[in-house]
Image (tube, rainbow, N blue to C red):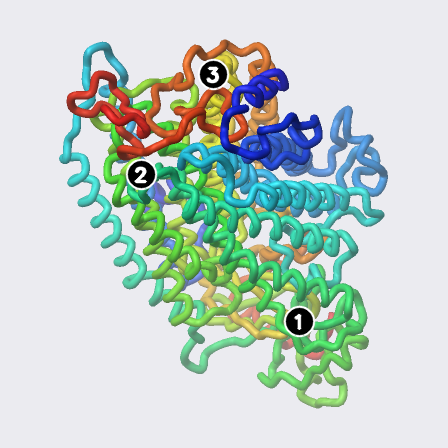
Amino acid sequence: MDDILQKLLPMQPLASVEGKDNDTLMYLIHGLVLILFVGWAIYYIVVLIKFRQKKNVKVVHSHTPHLISSYVEWVVVVIEFLLLFAFSIPFWAVHQAGMPEGKNVLEVRVVAQQFAWNVRYAGPSGKFGRSSARFLDDNPMGLDPHDPDNKDNITTMNQIYLPINKTVLITLTSKDVIHSFGLPAMRVKQDIIPGMTTHVWFTPNKLGQYEIACSQLCGVGHYRMRGIVYVVSQGDFDQWIQQNKGIHD
Amino acid sequence: MSSKHGQAHHDSHDSAHHDSSHPQSFWSQYVFSTDHKVIGIQYLFMSLFFLLVGFCLMLLMRWQIAYPGQPLPVIGKFFGENNMPGGVMLPEFYNQLGAMHGTIMVFLGIVPLGFAVFGNYLIPLQIGAKDMAFPRLNMFSYWSFFAGGMLMLSSFFLPGGPTGNGWTAYPPLSDISHDGQTIWLLSMFIIIISSLLSSLNFITTIFQLRAPGMTFERLPFFIWAQLITSFLLLLAFPPLEGAAFLQLFDRVLGSSFFLPTGLFVAGKIADISGGGNALLWQHLFWFLGHPEVYVLILPALGIVTEIIACNTRKNISGFGMMRWSVIFLGFLSFVVWSHHTYLTGMGTNITAFFQTTTMIISIPSIIIVSALFITLWGGSIRFNMPMLFALAFLPMFGFGGLTGLPLGLAATDVPLHDTYYVIGHFHYVVAPGVILGLFAGIYYWFPKATGRKMNDILGHLHFWPTLITMNFIFFPMLIQGLMGVNRRMYDGGATYLFSHNVLYWNVVETTAAFILALAQIPFIFNFFYSIWNGEKVNSDNPWHSSTLEWATPTPPPHGNFAKPITVYRDPYSYSLEGAPKDYSPQDQKEI
């Protein structure tokens, strides 16, 4: 079943737990689109052949198509509202506007700039140190060098390492213009507007590399503002954190 | 055409219109004319010119998308070292072409063609008036549109080129970019003034100048569509005018309406006062932007309705419902704008509100399209050129509307937002939808304006390849968008590995786009050839239509009607019981 759907509606192979809900709605709404369009098309072809102009045939006034059409319209309305209230609004409340619950959440901070993704981890201590625009000249994320909590923080550029099966919360800010954090394999996307803090969260459930694509026009380098998410095992991730603590690149 | 107009002018000598009582110079008759028909035709030439320019910009982009980094053959080297060194497009130039394609197509091509051309030419004719309520204001609208358009084009000759920030011009990027953006803002002011004055004029004309007996129930649907469109323009454009002023202040006077504190641009802290809000622009822009979508659509829907009624020889089924639907649509179009900004960090409640209104607005749209589909049932369908375009409009526009559903639901908008899916969706609405509808109108009213028909064979050579290639351009975009390929990519998405198994569609789309360009040659030739050499129509009403514009002499003289008009019946009085013919003109007392 999934294979057939994948053929009909080609999307990137899903790599997160939460994306499943999104895909379900995607298939349902496109099913509605398909049924309506095919239904209309069949009606259309029949009508155009059946009622083409012929000699001595007068026009027919009939009320039946009206009734059928208004039934169809009501059915469409009911389905639309079902999809809206049963899927789309709850999805938004949980996955987009909502925060992941429970303590077992990894927090990663991403600061976007023309045309790169700066990524920051708390390191083994689990604490993020202070940061300020005053220090942006010294390091791309403005980490305060005097704050001891920053000692084991890790910063990377365009690369995000994540452990599999662990929920990650990525907080997003921008230094300069509007960017958008798009990670299609996880079915997440979020605008990053300077002056605002936004977030995405998801639980990766497949090992591999996934591309981050900037999804709001941010200038001449927009098309190459690409990042990579590496989903690795928990062991590899812990090892990576230990090896890189305090390293800023 | 010139001799035709001279004749027309002479014929109208007896009409009460004061302007026609003395001979007019070439300048006052064709250039600074206050005649709504001449103004409509002036708009026609300019908007078709802008459509062609916008289309050519897109062809350049499509070459780069399909063959990134490869030099454009033959003409590539003429675009200058700043734009295409050695014929290879630079990303700056790509972004500029994208921004100007959108701006020109929306504000200088399709809106003027649908709203100003057909509105100007047809509103007085269809309501039985001699001219617009404010003919001089009408002339001013045209010339400010012309000036705004020329100013917009002139930005191509700036040292840094035109704006490259997308037609949506989101700050902070647009606030901090080069001078092209200032020119964009200035010409938008002028274009907006033009639209505001036209909409005032149309509304006043429709309310005040209807012929005796032309009640609101007897107005053709086209007039309803233009009336609602006028209200949308009148009420939605001022916020953008204001927002454009604010952005201009940010750029020129150093204010920070859209610039938050602490911007760090290109390696240093930006020299701005800060304290503004970048998101504010998006809401002001889309408060216009969404009603603007209906400004694009409604005139084409009106045109298609006229043509379908005439060529099925039937009244429009559910005409009353259609009128209420279009009014409802007009109101609703003001409360759906934020479905363009779902991903800016909106909360659950506000998103739920805009999703709900977006689903509700699909209902009047479906009712209108269904009414047109049902009208065909039981009709006596004539497949002439205008009707073919109108019949192609329906499923294409319908498909464009349906692909809006996954974008209107916020959850499915997340993966689709800013991908090619969006591009495919709204181009289905506007290109094989609205543009085919507008072509239908050109073929349909051409005999009234010129006294000659456009050629059918050339018409078919224009219609079929246009319809087919448009589908080859826009359908694959939906597939690419589902895979996650983003819009506004200089290399068409080649940077991303995930795009690679759908990138071959770029070549298909580009090839189709170039064939689409070739398919416009028969139209351009047909258009000019038929003005002077087309088959003459031997009647003032060659399509046997029942609406008032066909009650005029051909072409209509200054002042329009040869005799006073009184309206006796509904607009689509076709195949009435007991009538001798299958159409009963609105101004004819006996059926």
As rendered, which of B97 and B315 lies closer to the eye? B315
Q: Determine which of the numbered discs, if any, sits on residue B460 in the image.
A: 3
In the rendered image, the quadrant that contains the C terminus of chain B is top left
Return the chain for callout 3: B
N-terminal of the pair, mark 2 or mark 1, is 2
N-terminal of the pair, mark 2 or mark 3, is 2
Tell me the residue that label 1 is attached to.
Answer: B257
Query: Hey, what amino acid is under mark 3?
Result: His
Return the chain for callout 2: B
Q: Is label 2 on the same chain as label 1?
A: yes
Q: Position of residue A217 (x, y in %)?
A: 64, 55
Query: Hey, what amino acid is under mark 1?
Result: Phe
Q: Determine which of the numbered discs, if any, sits on residue B213 in the image.
A: 2
At x 27%, y 58%, the residue is: A81
Q: Is residue A160 left or right of residue B222?
A: right
Q: Is residue B376 left or right of residue A155?
A: left
Q: Position of residue B46 (x, y in %)?
A: 64, 34
Query: Hey, what amino acid is under mark 2?
Result: Gly
Instruction: Decide: few, some or many residues near mark 2? Use Cα within 10 Å; few <14, some 14-19, many ≥20.
Output: some
Residue B246 visible (yes or no):
yes
Q: Determine which of the numbered discs, if any, sits on residue A212 in the image.
A: none
In the rendered image, the quadrant that contains the N terminus of chain B is top right
Q: CA distance from mark 2 to mark 1?
A: 52 Å
Instruction: Decide: few, some or many residues near mark 1? Use Cα within 10 Å; few <14, some 14-19, many ≥20.
Output: many
